[in-house]
Image (cartoon, rainbow, N blue to C red):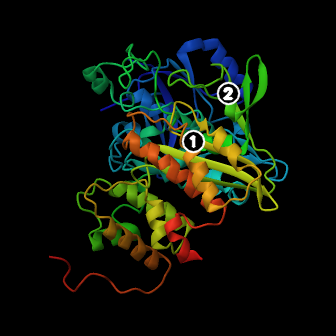
Amino acid sequence: MMRLPPFTYLAPLSVGEAVRMMADHGPEAMFVAGGTDLYPNMKRRQFEPKVLVGLRGIRELVGVRGEATTGLVIGAGTTLTDVSEHPAVREHVPALAVAAGLVSTPPLRNMGTIGGNVCVDPRCNYYNQSYQWRRAIGFCMKKDGDICLVAPGSSRCWAVSSTDTAPVLWSLGARARLVGVGGERVVPVASLFKDDGIDYLAKARDEVLTEILLPPVDGLRCAYLKLRRRGSFDFPVLGVAVALSLDGGRVKTAKIVLGAVASQPREAVEAGALLVGERLTPALIAEVAGVAARPSKPLDNTDLTHPYRKKMTKVFVARALRRLAGLPDSPENEEEVA
Amino acid sequence: MPTKTILTLRVNGETHEVAVPVHKTLLEVLREDLGLIGTKHGCELGECGTCTVLVDGQPVLSCLALPVELGGREILTVEGMAPPGQLHPLQQAFAELGAAQCGYCTPGILLTSLALLADKREPTRDEIRQALSGNICRCTGYTKILEAVELAALRMSGTPSPSPLPQGGRG
């Protein structure tokens, strides 16, 4: 049996109280929201905090507020179920509803929060294992060891960003509100991450992610596609988020963001730029998908083989763009629909 | 020995006071402190669904829930689905259709189905499949499970339906 290691549980009722508690307890404390990622990790001794600051009792963190035309605001403590079922999210930012609804399983989504999914600990086949397994094979640098077992010559950790919602939020140009003891700041979701499997968040320890601020989404088209072995349970081994706006049939703005191909979501900047000012023709989509796959450099540390995941990046980007263009998923099927 | 905390939990309509360390999960408290062993202990990591219970009517994973976070919430386990000695229509349908082989996943699936039927009286097969997509049956008896949920839904919505049991029962 794997039991949680002992800890003290604190239940603040406001964000201010939560960040003060975190600052008071220092590195031995961690925040917990839904607990769906942290508790399994604690059972496997990836984390052994002496103090947990529970965010569940903080009402101001829960709920979707505002209007899509001026920008929805999603409390970070809103469950993934509530995000995926929210009428305004479904209507105006369907890619976010889809991504939230594809995280793990229904009961887990009833517990897990969007803030937790954005901040989810990067994963690796050599890391997300029981203590005994890790001890037997030799610990890695992400926990208890000093080398990377995926790339032993490397000085950094290559654990994989495994959030479904962050690539979508990045593609939409969303921002995140962080509140700490020193005050609060609003940063683009795109600058919330660092390319390191251990130190992966550009957020201070005492800062809480309180809100996701979506921009006005007038006329924005967005899509999210997820690759994994099973249709449920699994973390993404590839996520593709695309958001674009059109003006008179031509692309006005475009962002393509890849998930689970690096330690942070990765924007395919060059590919997005190729779309701007152009019409979404099948030929352009094929070209852009090839360019978008370039920043995808998966390593052999998740489910499914890394060459396949790289290959599927191109396929999924093309598929996402084709959907937004109203084309069938693959060129071979074009006649069926036309 | 870690310090114990006294917690009040509402389980199956009854109020329980338990003295437990805060790091004990709801699953552990249900089974070890309240003796409610109908909730099964599977993967312990949120990857199988067999420990599912309802909290305020919503399926949650008891292996990843802390009792300290559940004060004032109504917890329902498989023991509370029907009065003692009786079966809920879902349990009846599962028994009649043989929708359980080893039975280990059954409590979680029954409760998840109960939540689904409270929300949708006549779910489609796809809706049932989606609702149960967090519950693994390692005997892979999924078809009978889906059929049993459909039968229970029919009976619960008052639609007349023939008994699937042949005369004399199953041999």
User: Which of the 4 quarters of the picture holds residue B20?
Assistant: top left
> Circle 1 — which element?
strand
- Disc 1 sits on a residue from what chain? A
Q: Is residue B59 visible?
A: no
Q: Is residue B103 visible?
A: yes
* Residue A280 % position (x, y): 68, 59
Label 1: how many residues lie within 10 Å, few (<14), some (14-19) or many (20+)? Answer: many
* Residue A24 % position (x, y): 64, 12
* Residue B136 % position (x, y): 35, 54
Q: Quadrant of the N terminus of chain B?
A: top left
How many numbered circles are shown? 2
* Residue A226 % position (x, y): 51, 50
Say yes or no: labels 1 and 2 on the same chain. yes
Comparing A263 with A104, the one in front is A263
Comparing B68 with A20, the one in front is A20
Which residue is label 2 attached to? Answer: A208
> Which numbered tag is attached to residue A247?
none
Label 2: how many residues lie within 10 Å, few (<14), some (14-19) or many (20+)? Answer: many
Residue B132 drawn above or below residue B65 = below
The three-letter amino acid code for the residue at tag 2 is Val
Comparing A259 with B67, the one in front is A259
Question: What residue is shown at x 46% (from left), y 28% (from top)?
Answer: A159
The three-letter amino acid code for the residue at tag 1 is Leu
Q: Quadrant of the C terminus of chain B?
A: bottom left
Question: What residue is shown at x 55% (from left), y 21% (from top)?
Answer: A199
Outermost residue, right side:
A70
Left or right: A64, with A66 as reference point: left
> Circle 2 — which element?
strand
Which residue is label 1 attached to? Answer: A258
- Disc 2 sits on a residue from what chain? A
Residue A161 drawn above or below residue B137 = above
Number of the front mark, 1 or 2: 1
